Image (spheres, helix red, strand yellow):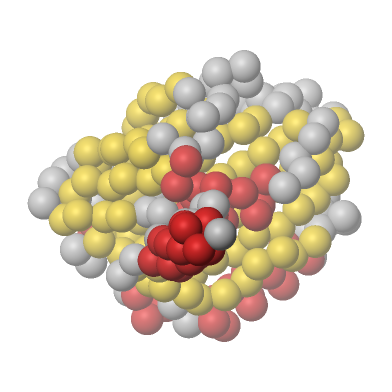
Amino acid sequence: MRILYFLILINVFTSCDHPKKPYIEELTWPKRTVKLDNGVGTLTIRLPQEFDTFYKFEDYSDHSCGDLMKYRFQKSSFPKSMERGMLRYLADSLYYFTIDHNLKPDCDPPPSYVFNPSHLENYIEKLKADDSLDKLKIQISKIDSFLGNKYSILAYENGIIFNLKEEVTNLNTSRLTAATYIKNQLLFFEFECAASNCDSFIPKMYKALKTVEIKPN
């Protein structure tokens, strides 16, 4: 009896010394690495397994400060969407994460503008004034910091999206955007889902955003 009691005590103390680690969903996702062009640096992020396709492209604009380099992860079962200048092909469904930065760093606005809460407020007012966003629901609007990076974050849902023929398609749409800086250059992140079911997309992508690490070159 004494031996059994002694063994129970050992088990109790051993359990106390080694508590179970809490389950953190995003830490089970694969880590993706992106080497940013123009010597900007290297970015890593943990994304859900379904983001299984990666490509990058240049999105040229008709004005000198609008040329962007874009890096995109997406779900392979969804059509690829690559914006190029005036060509804006809008696929009838989307599921992607995009990183972009200006090809001309001196074109970026200063951090004092991007991280000003009034900038987010003004943008939200513009969204509310958009007649095509009649089912707009703001989910996140704040300035926050994760892993040493400061972000201006906005996330919202809407019930419709316009397709290539400019007809309304009844889809759920969810979008989370975040802006940060590396070496005084603006980095813009965009997570977007436009599909029949975008439930929990924003909370899930918010978790992914919190895993971003950026190392300047």
Q: Which quadrant, please, contains the N terminus?
A: bottom right
Q: How many marks?
A: 0
Residue 204 visible in rendering: yes
* Displayed quadrant of residue 176: bottom right
| Left or right relative to 104: residue 109 | right
| Left or right relative to 163: residue 101 | left
Given residues 52 and 49, the one toward you in this image is 49
Residue 7 position in % (x across, y down): 47, 57
Residue at 71 percent of width and 58 percent of height: 156
Residue extending furthest front?
Answer: 1
Residue at 81 percent of width and 40 percent of height: 172
Given residues 82 and 192, the one toward you in this image is 192
Residue 37, compared with residue 215, is above or below; it is: above
Residue at 20 percent of width and 54 percent of height: 215
Residue 62 visible in rendering: no
Residue 48 position in % (x across, y down): 53, 36
Given residues 135 and 102, the one toward you in this image is 135
* Displayed quadrant of residue 105: bottom left
Residue 86 position in % (x across, y down): 51, 33
* Displayed quadrant of residue 148: bottom left
Residue at 64 percent of width and 59 percent of height: 155
Given residues 93 and 48, the one toward you in this image is 48
Residue 96, compared with residue 41, is above or below; it is: above
| Left or right relative to 159: residue 71 | left
Residue 91 position in % (x across, y down): 66, 25
